Amino acid sequence: MSKRKFDVTGHPCQSHDVTKDAWYYVQKEGLALCHRARGQINIVVIPWRKIARALDDHAKAKDRLQ
């Protein structure tokens, strides 16, 4: 296993494959989701605050059902 590398902001430099046409990067602003379609690469950045809210909702989901 190779040693992880980080950029000047302290975030990992490597991408994380989801499928052969989709991957993501951890960035200072949030997660950059990348998708290749019809020869173009589309990128969407999800801010950390929205990710934190989604994780919080996920953790509390069982409580809402009771």
Image: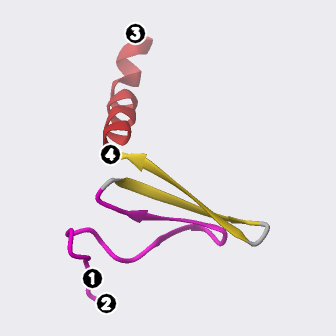
**Main secondary structure of the magenta stretch:** loop
- Residue 2 lies left or right of residue 62; in this view the side is left
- The secondary structure type at the circle numbered 4 is helix
The residue that label 3 is drawn on is 66
Give the residue displayed 27% in from the left and 82% down from the top: 5
Q: Are marks 3 and 2 in contact (CB under 8 Å)?
A: no
| Disc nearer the start of the sequence (1/4) | 1
Q: How far apart are marks 1 and 2 (CA)?
A: 9 Å
- Numbered circle sitting on residue 59: none
In magenta, the rendered stretch is: 1-28
The quarter of the image holding the N terminus is bottom left
Q: How far apart are marks 3 and 2 (CA)?
A: 46 Å
| Disc nearer the start of the sequence (3/4) | 4
Q: Quadrant of residue 56?
A: top left
Q: Do the residues labelled 1 and 4 touch (CB within 8 Å)?
A: no
- Residue 66 lies left or right of residue 21; in this view the side is left
Residue 27 magenta: yes
The residue that label 1 is drawn on is 5
Q: How far apart are marks 3 and 4 (CA)?
A: 29 Å
Give amino acid for label 4. Answer: Trp
Coordinates of residue 21 in the picture (x, y in percent): 66, 69
Give amino acid for label 1. Answer: Lys
